[in-house]
Image: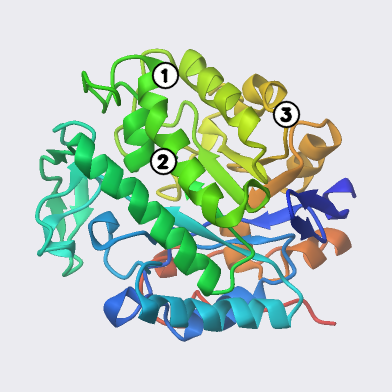
Amino acid sequence: MKLLTAETFGAIAASNRVIMAPLTRMRAGAGDVPNPLAAEYYSQRASAGFIVTEASQICPLGKGYPGTPGIYSDEQVAGWRTVTSAVHARGGKIVSQLWHVGRISHSSLHPEEGVPVAPSSIAPVGQVYTASWQLADYETPRALSVNEIAYLIASYRHAAIQAKAAGFDGVEVHAANGYLLDQFLQDGSNHRTDAYGGTVANRTRIVLEVLKAVIAVWGSERVGVRLSPYGTFNDMSDTDSLGLFTYVIEQLNPLKLAYLHMIEPRATDAGGSDRVYEGAPSTAQLFRKLYKGKVVMAGGYQRETAEEAVTAGLADGIAFGRLFLANPDLPARFERGASLNRYDRSTFYGGGEKGYTDYPFLNP
C-alpha cells in the first residue's frame, strides 16, 4: 500500500502516510496542563507517520471548552514534554496544533479576560460548554482592535516558542473549523472595514502574519497549517468559498510550509456526528492542484478511500481521527487488513482512561 510508504513533510520524516488527526479530548488538568494519561495516549499511537496533537490554546482567551490543554505556560510546557518524550521513545513524531477559538467560547472559561473576541461582534448560532460543563447560548463577542491583533500574533509566536521548548517536531497553525483565524477568513463572520476585513486579501492577512511569526521560530519546514474550505461547522459561511480558498492557497505557496492540511466538507460536523455529506464539493479535487507542496487530507476517509487518494496524487498523507482514537495501532491494522475497533462516542470528551487509553491493540 502506498499509504504505508515513507514520506517527508518538510523536515518531518514520516515512516508512513497515516497521520493522526487533531482530536479534542477535554482531559487536561488544573492550569490546562495535559493529563498524565496523555503521554500514554499519544505514545500508544506513535506508529502514525506523525501525530497532530489536540488543539491547544495559545493564551487564556483562546480557550473555548473545559479541559482543553494550553501551550503558553511553563507548566503546560512541562506537561507536554512528558508527551513528546514518550512519543519519541517509541520512534514517533508529534506536532503541536496552535489554537485560538475566537468567538467559539464563553466568558466563564476565561473570567479575567471577559467575553470572547472575534474579527467582528457577531455571535454564532448555537450553544457552548461553560467552565462547569453546562450548555449556554453563545455570547456576542468583542471585535479585536488592530493593536490587539498585533498582540494576538505575538501570542502565536510565544506559543510556537513554548512548543519548541516542549520538544515537539513542529507546529500546525489551526485556521479551520470556524475558530478565530477561520473567522477572519470567511465573510459570514468578518464584517471589518479595516486592513483585516473586506477584500479577500485583507481577510487572509492575519493568517499569513501568524504563519510568518511562527516560521520565524521554527523555520517553514516544520510549520503546517489547517484549512476547512466549504466547512460550515461553528456557524461558518462565505459568499465565495472557491475564490477565497483559491487565494489563500496561492498565498501559502511562497512560504514553503511543511504541509497544508485540509478537511473535506463531507465531514463538516468536525466530530459532532457520523453524517457524511456525499454531495459536498471535494476539497482534494478542487484545491490539491493549486498547492505546490505536501498536502494532508482529512475527513471521513477509510482504508480504501485513503489509498485511492494517495495513489491518485490527491494527497501525500491522510489524517484519521475517530479511527485512530479507537485503534492505537491503525497503521498495523491497515497493513494486515485487520478489523477495526469501534469507537465509543460517549467517551470522546472528558473523563479518564475509558475510551482514551484502553482501546485494545492487535494480538502480535
Whether residue 245 is situated above or below residue 301 in the rendered picture: above
Res 109 → quadrant? bottom left
- Tell whether 168 sits left or right of 2: left
Asked if one can make out residue 230 in the rendered structure from this viewpoint, the answer is: yes
Mark 3 lies on a secondary structure that is loop
Pick whichever of labels 1 and 3 is earlier in the sequence.
1
Q: Are marks 2 and 1 in contact (CB under 8 Å)?
A: no
Residue 88: x percent and y percent?
Answer: 69, 77
What residue sits right under mark 3 in the picture?
292
Q: Are marks 1 and 3 in contact (CB under 8 Å)?
A: no
**What's the mark number on residue 177?**
2
- Tell whether 103 sits left or right of 246: left
- Tell whether 123 sits left or right of 348: left
Q: Nearer the viewer, residue 342 or 96?
A: 96
Mark 1 lies on a secondary structure that is helix
**Point 12% across, 62% down: residue:** 108
Q: Nearer the viewer, residue 113 or 264?
A: 113
Pick whichever of labels 2 and 1 is earlier in the sequence.
2
Q: Nearer the viewer, residue 311 or 293?
A: 293
Quadrant containing the C terminus is bottom right
What residue sits right under mark 1 in the picture?
201
Distance from the alpha carbon under mark 2 to that under mark 3: 23 Å
Residue furthest front in the image? 216
Residue type indicated by callout 3? Lys
**Point 59% across, 47% down: residue:** 224
Whether residue 296 is situated above or below residue 11 in the rendered picture: above
Mark 2 lies on a secondary structure that is loop
